[in-house]
Image (cartoon, rainbow, N blue to C red):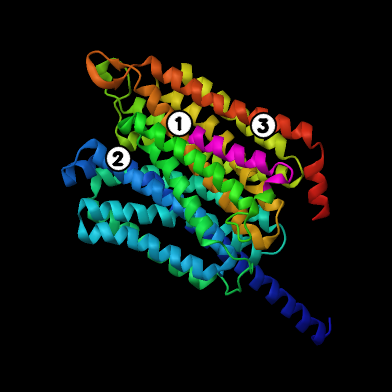
């Protein structure tokens, strides 16, 4: 081989190695971002009893911590993915990192109940940054970038759920509240620095603008809907009024957005094959997961002295749900590949069927530890497959300058679906109580709750059947044109 050829070969190898290194670094920091932002959503729940005693507040006041986070998430999932398209990736990563770090530092330093609420709202808002990798990985990676981006999000979700559940349970046992928040702040700060070092500078992907009025309107109706569902067990009929107002405002917002010259979301995307079905599925898979977590948590932490329950603590419950998180690693990649092959209906239906199977199993088999391990594994396998399809489909039907918007729509409805699933089963568990233990749900209500949750994936199966009938082969043809 001549010296010139050796030089060319060496240079080519160096470029390939550099590209591979950059790809690996981008994927690694993306997984880290998704993990820490998803984990925080699962960490605060186990800490509620500690917060209640630390600040000497009642149960309803403590649950406002989760409500504040939920309302912050409502605004974050509307704004952060959409702004990513019109602001460069690094700027959005920096803003999100600052919000998350501040959300942890404020309650750590001030250590008061009001600052805890403020911090929780900021953490909720910043947690929407978990959607950002769908945009910047798609723009900065070559090859099957959509497949990689969706896989990173789904796989990191599994890690985030495990870290959040176990981390929250361990924190209750071994850490003070302020120490927990300082550690959280350090994790967010380190993640932000890593992202700014690795993610390349880039120009905004889109020159579109987002209407301020339309954005404020959407945040308002989403907030009303989430607030109504979060407080339904406390405010009662008032919540149904708020929910009705929020739904009416949401319908009016959709009608106004169709005529807007600067829409928050391009609703024309929903007319493309399977796009609407993907969003409906995202809503319902969110409802499945929230209902599952709520039912498992309440039952397993009920003291056995009342006649049922496992009497575990928050850490014990989180360990029972580890299979729910671990099976995400199994189904996510295979599901996304099937969508890429033009078979979105198959994967949405398969995910829904598995979820229904796992929930029906738990409806009649939830008295022993091993039954939860089996049920959580099956539900996790199905929901991760479903999420892969729900997030991959919108990405595949839009150009990369709308990647953030295509992530924001299913993410927003997923969050609303989670609030709905939690609210629905909260109502179920409040229908009857054990006579000897006021406030403890009657045991038969768990069977009812799991069966109601199993109805959600059945709706997904129906929606998928309708789409497959109306658009036979349309999605595969759309991919072929891309």
Q: Which mark, by number, is residue 291?
A: 1
Identify the residue at image location x=66%, y=38%: 277
Residue 432 position in % (x across, y down): 33, 16
Residue 199 position in % (x across, y down): 55, 69
Part of the protein shown in magenta:
270-289
Q: Residue lying at the far top in this picture: please name it.
A: 435
Mark 1 burial class by Cα count in 10 Å: few <14, some 14-19, many 20+: many
User: The residue tagged with tag 1: helix, strand or loop?
Assistant: helix
Left or right position of 463 against 426: right
Q: Residue at label 2?
A: 63
Q: Within the image, what quadrant is residue 3 found in?
A: bottom right
Mark 3 burial class by Cα count in 10 Å: few <14, some 14-19, many 20+: many
Q: Residue lying at the far left in this picture: please name it.
A: 56
Identify the residue at image location x=40%, y=52%: 72
Q: Which mark, by number, is residue 463?
A: 3
Identify the residue at image location x=57%, y=56%: 264
Residue 453 in sight from this viewpoint: yes
Residue 415 position in % (x across, y down): 49, 43
User: The residue tagged with tag 3: helix, strand or loop?
Assistant: helix
């Amino acid at each position: 081989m001549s010296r010139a050829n050796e030089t060319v070969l060496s240079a080519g190898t160096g470029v390939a190695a550099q590209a591979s290194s950059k790809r690996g670094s981008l994927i690694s920091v993306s997984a880290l971002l998704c993990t820490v932002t998803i984990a925080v959503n699962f960490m605060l729940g186990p800490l509620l009893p500690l917060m209640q005693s630390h600040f000497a507040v009642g149960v309803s006041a403590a649950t406002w911590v989760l409500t504040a986070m939920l309302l912050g998430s409502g605004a974050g999932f509307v704004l952060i993915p959409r702004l990513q398209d019109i602001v460069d990736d690094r700027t959005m990563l920096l803003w999100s990192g600052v919000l998350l770090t501040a959300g942890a530092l404020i309650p750590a330093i001030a250590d008061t109940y009001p600052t805890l609420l403020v911090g929780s709202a900021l953490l909720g808002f910043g947690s929407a940054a978990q959607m950002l990798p769908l945009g910047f990985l798609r723009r900065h990676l070559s090859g099957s970038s959509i497949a990689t981006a969706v896989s990173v999000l789904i796989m990191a979700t599994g890690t985030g759920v495990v870290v959040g559940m176990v981390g929250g349970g361990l924190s209750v046992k071994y850490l003070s509240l302020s120490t927990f928040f300082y550690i959280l702040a350090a994790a967010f700060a380190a993640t932000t620095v890593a992202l700014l070092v690795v993610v390349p500078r880039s120009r905004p992907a889109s020159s579109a603008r987002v209407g301020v009025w339309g954005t404020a309107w959407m945040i308002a109706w989403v907030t009303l809907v989430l607030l109504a569902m979060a407080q339904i067990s406390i405010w009662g009929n008032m919540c149904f009024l708020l929910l009705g107002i929020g739904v009416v405002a949401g319908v009016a917002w959709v009608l106004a957005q169709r005529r807007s010259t600067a829409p928050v979301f391009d609703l024309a995307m929903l007319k493309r094959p399977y796009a609407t079905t993907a969003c409906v599925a995202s809503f319902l898979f969110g409802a499945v997961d929230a209902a599952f977590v709520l039912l498992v948590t309440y039952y397993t932490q009920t003291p056995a002295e009342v006649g049922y329950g496992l009497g575990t603590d928050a850490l014990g419950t989180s360990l029972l749900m580890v299979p729910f998180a671990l099976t995400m690693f199994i189904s996510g990649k295979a599901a996304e590949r099937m969508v890429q092959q033009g078979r979105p209906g198959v994967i949405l239906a398969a995910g829904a069927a598995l979820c229904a199977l796992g929930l029906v199993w738990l409806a009649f088999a939830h008295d022993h530890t091993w039954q939860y391990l089996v049920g959580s594994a099956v539900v996790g396998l199905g929901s991760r497959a479903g999420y892969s399809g729900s997030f991959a489909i919108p990405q595949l039907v839009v150009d990369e300058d709308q990647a953030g918007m295509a992530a924001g729509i299913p993410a927003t409805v997923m969050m609303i679906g989670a609030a709905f699933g939690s609210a629905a089963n909260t109502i179920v568990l409040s229908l009857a109580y054990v006579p000897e233990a006021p406030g403890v749900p009657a045991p038969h209500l768990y069977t009812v709750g799991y069966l109601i949750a199993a109805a959600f994936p059945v709706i997904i199966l129906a929606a998928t059947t309708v789409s497959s009938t109306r658009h036979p082969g349309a999605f595969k043809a759309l991919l072929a044109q891309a």
